[in-house]
Image (cartoon, helix red, strand yellow):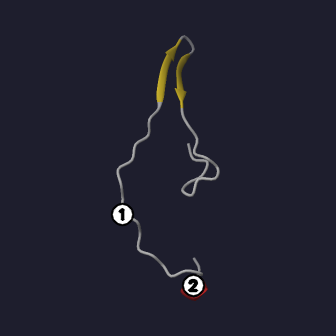
């Protein structure tokens, strides 16, 4: 963790929490369940690349 004197910008208070959801599409096949997930863009500002 950087020292306060090393920060480029002053520390900000944490953002308020918001409700969120994850949607997974499931399909039952003869081979078992199939799951469709999406991956966040690698250029997203928050958790890039997360599923």
- Local crowd size for mark 2, using a 10 Å CA cut-off: few (<14), some (14–19), many (≥20): few
Q: Which x, y percent locates residue 21?
A: 40, 43
Kindly state the secondary structure of the residue where label 1 is placed.
Answer: loop
Q: Tell which residue pokes out farthest to the top in this image.
A: 30
Q: Which residue is mark 1?
A: 16
For image coordinates 44% across by 35% down, the residue present is: 23
For image coordinates 53% across by 27% down, the residue present is: 35
Residue 44 vs 33, above or below: the answer is below
For image coordinates 57% across by 84% down, the residue present is: 3
- Local crowd size for mark 1, using a 10 Å CA cut-off: few (<14), some (14–19), many (≥20): few
For image coordinates 59% across by 80% down, the residue present is: 2
As rendered, which of 39 and 33 lies closer to the eye?
Answer: 39
Q: Which x, y percent locates residue 41?
A: 61, 47
User: What's the CA distance linking mark 1 and mark 2?
Assistant: 24 Å
Asked if disc 1 and disc 2 are in contact, CB closer than 8 Å, the reply is no
Residue 19 vs 28, above or below: the answer is below
């Amino acid at each position: 963790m950087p020292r306060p004197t090393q920060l480029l910008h002053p520390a900000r208070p944490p953002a308020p929490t918001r409700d969120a959801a994850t949607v997974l599409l499931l399909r039952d096949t003869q081979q078992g369940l199939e799951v469709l997930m999406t991956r966040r863009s690698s250029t997203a500002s928050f958790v890039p690349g997360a599923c």
